[in-house]
Image (cartoon, rainbow, N blue to C red):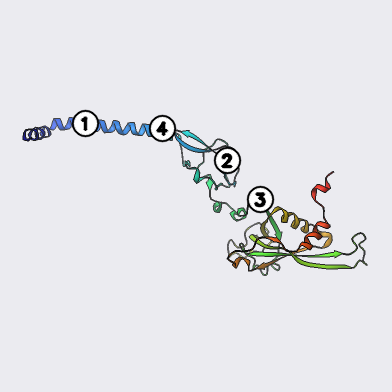
């Protein structure tokens, strides 16, 4: 054992020997490290790509995404490699993601990062509606995004609809048409959000909300009933203060029946 120890000490005491060993170790380390980096660079990894062209401001769903194996060395820029970082997000406002393209962090954003992102926050299958308003009928600009409103309808119910004359005895109708309508945004005549900058006083021109298609069609019909001098009146409620606000609903079946009576379905006008 002592002889072995002495031999090792003599070996290590020889500078030439130590130099040679050091060089050999360095070469081995470089070789192993180089091979590791080469293998890492050429070993394919699975990355997501677009299976279809995705227009700007489009919600990205799983059916728009495929997967492909590519060498890591081919990934340039900030390519996204995890599908979970893509699904449910949006293509940016100024970017078209071509079919076959990889996804990059600059082209995939959260909904909140989109311009006017608030108008995208409504259930699938619903329809976005913009209703003209004024400072007066928003109670001095007191209708805010996230609040709930009821929509009242005022109209002239013409008794003699076949022969409207100056002698026709018209009657005013007033009732609640829709209830629990959630306000998405309030914008001015330029389309800018009234409450985006509270230091900049803006005049409300439209209240934006979303409705199920059936309610949307009914409300649109009411909007176009000029013959009956229809006026739609938004009325703020305290529904947003409830732990569980009520669902949007038709508030008056008689008003619904009246609107449908004095209008026709689109299909009925097509021969």
Residue identified by numbered label 1:
23
Name the residue located 28 percent from the left edge and 32 percent from the top edge. Answer: 30
Residue 218 seen by the camera:
yes
Q: 172 or 105: which is nearer to us? A: 172
Answer few, some or many: residues within 10 Å of disc 2's Cα (few below 14, many 20 plus, some between 14 and 19): some
Of badges 4 and 3, the one in the foreground is: 3
Answer few, some or many: residues within 10 Å of disc 4's Cα (few below 14, many 20 plus, some between 14 and 19): few
Answer few, some or many: residues within 10 Å of disc 1's Cα (few below 14, many 20 plus, some between 14 and 19): few
Are the residues at dot 3 and dot 1 in contact (C-beta closer than 8 Å)?
A: no
Q: Is residue 30 left or right of residue 147?
A: left
- Who comes first in sequence, dot 2 or dot 3? 2
Are the residues at dot 1 and dot 4 in contact (C-beta closer than 8 Å)?
A: no
- Who comes first in sequence, dot 4 or dot 3? 4
Determine the CA span between mark 3 and mark 1.
70 Å
Looking at this rendering, what residue extends furthest in the left direction? 2
Indicate the position of residue 46 as horizontal and vertical percent values.
47, 36
Residue identified by numbered label 2:
64
Indicate the position of residue 158 as horizontal and vertical percent values.
87, 64
SS for dot 3: loop
* Quadrant of residue 50 within the rendered picture: top right
Residue identified by numbered label 3:
125
Indicate the position of residue 165 as horizontal and vertical percent values.
93, 64
Determine the CA span between mark 4 and mark 2.
26 Å
SS for dot 1: helix
Of badges 1 and 4, the one in the foreground is: 4
Are the residues at dot 2 and dot 3 in contact (C-beta closer than 8 Å)?
A: no
Q: Quadrant of the N terminus?
A: top left
Residue 206 seen by the camera:
no
Name the residue located 59 percent from the left edge and 54 percent from the top edge. Answer: 117
Q: What label does residue 43 carry, if any?
A: 4
């Amino acid at each position: 054992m002592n002889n072995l120890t002495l031999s090792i000490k003599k070996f290590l005491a020889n500078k030439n020997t130590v130099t040679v060993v050091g060089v050999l170790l360095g070469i081995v380390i470089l070789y192993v490290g180089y091979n590791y980096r080469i293998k890492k660079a050429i070993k394919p990894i699975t990355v997501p790509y677009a299976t279809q062209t995705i227009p700007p401001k489009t919600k990205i769903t799983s059916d728009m995404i495929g997967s492909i194996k590519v060498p890591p060395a081919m990934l340039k820029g900030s390519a996204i490699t995890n599908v979970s970082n893509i699904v449910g997000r949006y293509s940016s406002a100024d970017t078209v993601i071509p079919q076959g393209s990889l996804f990059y962090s600059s082209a995939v954003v959260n909904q909140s990062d989109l311009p006017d992102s608030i108008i995208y926050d409504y259930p699938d299958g619903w329809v976005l509606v913009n209703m003209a308003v004024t400072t007066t009928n928003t109670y001095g600009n007191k209708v805010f995004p996230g609040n709930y409103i009821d929509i009242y309808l005022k109209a002239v119910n013409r008794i003699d609809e076949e022969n409207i004359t100056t002698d026709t005895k018209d009657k005013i109708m007033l009732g609640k048409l829709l209830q629990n309508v959630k306000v998405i945004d309030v914008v001015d005549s330029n389309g800018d959000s009234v409450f985006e900058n509270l230091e900049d006083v803006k005049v409300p021109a439209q209240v934006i909300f979303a409705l199920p298609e059936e309610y949307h069609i009914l409300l649109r019909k009411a909007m176009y009933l000029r013959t009956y001098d229809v006026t739609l009146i938004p009325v703020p409620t305290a529904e947003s203060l409830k732990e569980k606000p009520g669902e949007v609903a038709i508030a008056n079946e008689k008003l619904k029946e009246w609107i449908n009576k004095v209008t026709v379905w689109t299909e009925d006008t097509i021969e």
